[in-house]
Image: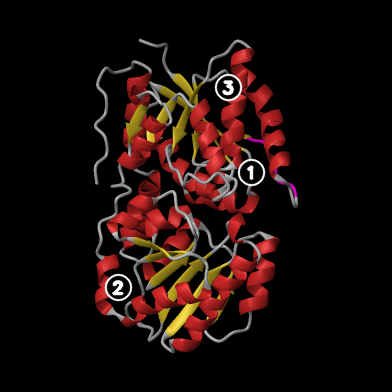
């Protein structure tokens, strides 16, 4: 039996990481005799990160505050490494948990590994492990961030059976892989309970298309192309309104504003806080996105998702029929969205498909896996099955 409580440091820096790590932190807090959770944020995304923390009532114990205007991937990586070195030496945790595929994830995993050279072995737990596109530059830099994190991690929390197969194919020992489902569904259900009911007393005669787009591989011409499709949809379908939640990136905003600002029934809005965004998803008719998290969340709300990318590391949603990969071409996006807006049967086929990503208990499985990994219990938790 290990000496309890075990100090578990969660490290994250962006809005998506915070959304998916928050339920894990809240679950760890339910086991004070076994775990001492310590929350560290890098603030790779400052304002968007703070929105999530407030919504889930989480106060960081340590804040590296690395955010700088126009920072490069190299600068983010070096600042995270430099900031975490003395902190990990001081905290001396039994484990560090990271989530997903951001630069913070890779750098935090590397910093934890480097601590071994200082005499402390820190187990790295990777939440949402095993996602792959098998194209190292698409998405960039996420595909390599998650692959490198796999090499550094000791405990792998795979969201799906396919993710586990990917890890085993990369040589990860099967005993270190736990299929947990995705914590984004835990967060979504938590947020949905906090929302006011939909305003059914004032029905709108317009169907809302909710749009998000931000990935680096979609900067430039792909972003202009997908904006062209959105513009055509608003022109062609008089009963449609578009709500485009613009990412903070100036590169994204410059193109989106140039292509869509001032057009009828297209609203460009600031990134909403997470709880408002869940409300927008709930109230939307259709969602167009290049976000990984939205591909997982929207099906739990019965919303079809068109993925404006050429690859996806979440093939389970495509196989289940909850999402469709449509690329970034204007004609392709317009055609696929137009079919869902015109055909009730096509729409219902996607809206009623079963979500393969989670059941709202993923955080419980992750904490149970930690109890098993560290020998607090000999009972291995059951794997998630859709």
Residue at 66% in and 59% down: 249
Residue 153 pos. (x, y %): 49, 27
344 sits left or right of 54 in the view = left
Q: Can residue 59 be seen in this view?
A: no
Give the distance between the C-alpha atoms of the residues marked 2 and 3, in whole angstroms.
Answer: 47 Å
Q: Earlier in the sequence, mark 2 or mark 3?
A: 3
Question: How would you classify the magenta stretch by its main secondary structure?
Answer: loop
Residue 13 pos. (x, y %): 59, 42
Contact between labelled residues 3 and 2, with CB atoms less than 8 Å apart: no
What residue is pinned by disc 3?
Answer: 113
Few, some or many residues within 10 Å of mark 2 (<14, 14–19, 20+): some
Residue 41 pos. (x, y %): 60, 38
Residue at 52% in and 59% down: 273
> Looking at the picture, does residue 309 appear above or below residue 201?
above
Q: Earlier in the sequence, mark 3 or mark 1?
A: 1
What residue is pinned by disc 1?
Answer: 43
Residue 236 pos. (x, y %): 46, 88
User: Which residue range is magenta in the image?
Assistant: 63-68
Residue at 56% in and 39% down: 145
92 sits left or right of 295 in the view = right
Give the distance between the C-alpha atoms of the residues marked 3 and 1, in whole angstroms.
Answer: 21 Å
Q: Can residue 155 be seen in this view?
A: yes
Q: Earlier in the sequence, mark 2 or mark 1?
A: 1
Q: Which of marks 3 and 1 is in front?
A: 3
Residue 347, disc? 2
67 sits left or right of 105 in the view = right
Few, some or many residues within 10 Å of mark 3 (<14, 14–19, 20+): some
Q: Which image quadrant is residue 366 in? A: top left
160 magenta-colored: no
Secondary structure under the numbered disc 3 in the rendered image = helix
């Amino acid at each position: 039996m290990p000496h309890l409580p075990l100090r578990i440091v969660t490290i994250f820096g962006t809005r998506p990481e915070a959304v998916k790590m928050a339920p894990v932190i809240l679950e760890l807090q339910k086991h004070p005799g076994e775990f001492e959770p310590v929350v560290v944020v890098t603030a790779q995304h400052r304002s968007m990160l703070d929105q999530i923390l407030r919504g889930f009532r989480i106060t960081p114990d340590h804040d590296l505050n690395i955010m700088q205007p126009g920072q490069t991937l190299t600068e983010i990586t070096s600042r995270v490494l430099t900031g975490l070195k003395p902190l990990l030496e001081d905290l001396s945790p039994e484990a560090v948990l990271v989530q997903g595929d951001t630069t913070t994830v890779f750098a935090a995993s590397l910093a934890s590994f480097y601590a071994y050279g200082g005499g402390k072995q820190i187990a790295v737990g990777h939440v949402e492990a095993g996602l792959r596109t098998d194209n190292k530059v698409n998405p960039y830099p996420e595909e390599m961030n998650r692959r490198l994190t796999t090499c550094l991690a000791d405990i792998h929390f795979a969201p799906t059976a396919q993710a586990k197969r990917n890890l085993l194919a990369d040589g990860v020992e099967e005993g270190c892989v736990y299929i947990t489902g995705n914590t984004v569904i835990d967060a979504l259900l938590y947020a949905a309970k906090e929302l006011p009911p939909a305003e059914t007393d004032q029905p709108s005669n317009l169907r809302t298309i909710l749009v998000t787009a931000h990935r680096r591989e979609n900067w430039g011409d792909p972003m202009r192309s997908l904006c062209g499709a959105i513009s055509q949809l608003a022109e062609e379908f008089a009963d449609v309104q578009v709500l485009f939640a613009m990412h903070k990136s100036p590169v994204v905003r410059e193109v989106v504003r140039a292509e869509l600002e001032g057009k009828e029934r297209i609203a460009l809005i600031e990134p909403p806080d997470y709880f408002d965004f869940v409300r927008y998803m709930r109230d939307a008719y259709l969602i167009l996105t290049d976000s990984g998290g939205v591909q997982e969340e929207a099906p739990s709300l019965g919303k079809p998702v068109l993925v404006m990318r050429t690859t996806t590391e979440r093939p389970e949603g495509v196989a289940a029929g909850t999402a469709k990969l449509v690329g970034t071409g204007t004609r392709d996006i317009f055609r696929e969205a137009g079919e869902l807006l015109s055909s009730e049967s096509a729409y219902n086929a996607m809206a009623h498909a079963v979500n393969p990503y989670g059941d709202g208990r993923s955080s419980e499985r992750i904490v149970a896996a930690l109890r098993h990994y560290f020998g607090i219990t000999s009972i291995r938790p059951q794997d998630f099955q859709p």
